[in-house]
Image (cartoon, grey):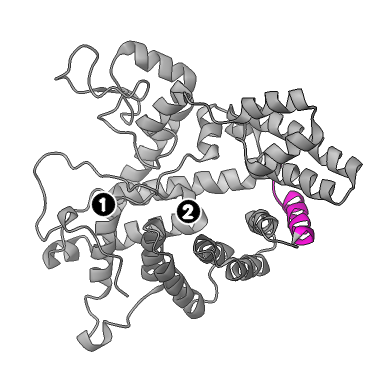
Amino acid sequence: MPLAAIPPQTVNNTVQTEGEYQDRFLEGSQRIVPYDLLEARGNAEKSDDPDAKIYRQAKELFRKGYELCMTIPRSLDDQVLEKHEEDIKTASETMVEAWIMDDKAAPMSERILILGQQYEKVLLKNIPEEQKEGFFVRDSLLFSAWILLVGRQFKHCITTLSLAIDTYPDLPARVFFLRASCYLSMGKLRLGIKDLEKALERDAKFSIAYFVLGSVYLSLENERENAIKNYKLYLQNGHPDTNDAVHALYALSVLVNHKKRKNEAHDYYIKAKATEERFKELYGTHTGLSETKRNAIIAHESESEAQHLISLYAPKKQPDQKLQQLIQSGVLNNSYPPNPKSCSNCAAAHVKDKPDTPLLACGACRSIWYCSRDCQVTDFKSSHKNQCKQLQASKATATATITEQK
C-alpha cells in the first residue's frame, strides 16, 4: 500500500550530513490544543478531564517515537535500512499509536514523511515482487491515512481507512471518527453521521462524537430534535471543563428557545456562562465567538449587554502577545522540543544585541532556548517552571529507550 508522495527535495539515497538537520512540521498539522494551554498555566491537576490525560499520554508517546525517528539517517539505502530496521518499525508504530489515541497530539513533519517511505520499504523487503502491490499491514495503512488526512486528500484517506476497518475489525472508535471527519470535510454529511454513529457503537463513551453529531444536525434543516438529543448526550458523557461543553450549552439554549421553552433555554444559557467562567479560569482564555454563541447572547441578554459581550468575545485585531510568543516558540502547539532558532519568550532568532550568536539553551532540560537572561526568567515564571522537569524526564526516558534498543 504505497504511502503518500514525499517532496523529492526531502529525501535521497545517501545519508545527509551537512549541518544540523532541522525538521519542518507541515502546515495544517500543528494546531493550538487547549490542553497545552492548561498545562502551560500549571492547571493540569485542577481538572480530571479524561481526554486531557489521554492527550498527554499520546503526546508523550509521539515524542518518544519522534525522538527515535530523529536518530535514524534520512536514507532509503538498503544497507542503512537494514541496520536501522527495528528502530524504523518502532518509531513508525509508536507514532501511529499516538495518532490513533489523539490525532491532535501527532503533528506531521517532513522527517515523518521520510520515515513513512523507510517503513514501507522495510515492510516490503522480503515480499515477492508480484505480491508487493497489494501488500499492507495495519500500521502501514494507518500511517498512510495519517499522511493523507494532514494533506487534505480526503477521498484517498477514506479509501485507506475503509480498507483498514474492513481488514482489522478491532480498530478503536477514533478510526471511524477520523473517517467521519473526511466525509464531513467533503460535505458528505449523511455519510459522516453514519460513521459518527459507528464510532459510538464501538465506544458509547466516545463523547466528542455526540458533540460533532449535534453540530452537524444543527447545520441541517428540520433536525433540531436530533441536535438537542446529541448535545444532551455529550453533556451526559463528556466533561464540563471543555470548550465543547460550553458550546453545547449555548447551542441548547438556542435550540430549546426555538421550541418556546423559554425558562429551560435560559437555564442552559446561565449554565453556559458559568461553564465558560470555569474554562477561562483553567485555560486563561474564553471560547471565542461562534454564530451559535452570538445567537444565544442576543436571545438572552439586553441589547446593550449583548453588544458588550459580543465585542468581548469577538476576535481581536491584536492577538495576545504572550500567546503568540508561546505559539512561535513551539511550547503550545508542538509535540517535539522547541526550536533552537527561536527564543521561547520573545521568538528572537539570536542572543540579544548579538546577531551572530546562537540562542542559549535552558541549562536543566536543554530543550528550550532563550535570547537573554531576562527572557529566561520571565518565561520560567510564566510557564516553563511547570514544563522543565517534564522535559527532563521525557529526554531521560527516550535516551534510556534508545540505549536499550541498541
The kind of residue tagged 1 is Arg
> Residue drawn at (43%, 38%), measured in percent from left and top?
333
Q: Is 252 displayed left or right of 309 in the figure? A: right
Can you give x and y, in whole percent of width and height, for residue 32 in the image? 47, 39
> Residue drawn at (42%, 72%), measured in percent from left and top?
160
168, 218: nearer the viewer: 218
Where is residue 87, by image quadrant? bottom left
The kind of residue tagged 2 is Asp
Q: Would you place residue 180 above or below residue 266 in this image?
A: below
Give the numbered dot on residue 111.
1
Where is residue 193, by image quadrant? bottom right
Circle 2 residue: 103
Residue 201 in sight from this viewpoint: yes
Q: Would you place residue 45 above or below residue 362 in this image?
A: below
Magenta segment range? 224-240
> Residue drawn at (69%, 59%), measured in percent from left and top?
217
> Mark 1 to mark 2: distance in Å?
17 Å
Q: Secondary structure at mark 1?
A: helix
Can you give x and y, in whole percent of width and height, for residue 143 in the image? 37, 64
Q: Residues within 10 Å of mark 1 (few under 14, many from 20)?
A: many
> Residue drawn at (53%, 69%), measured in percent from left and top?
171
Q: Residues within 10 Å of mark 2 (few under 14, many from 20)?
A: many
- Residue closest to the far bottom: 130
Residue 237 falls inside the magenta stretch = yes
Q: Is 68 displayed left or right of 390 in the figure? A: left
Find out whether the residues at labels 1 and 2 contact each other: C-beta distance under 8 Å. Answer: no
Residue 386 falls inside the magenta stretch = no
Q: Is 48 displayed left or right of 382 in the figure? A: right
The quadrant of the picture occupied by the C terminus is bottom left
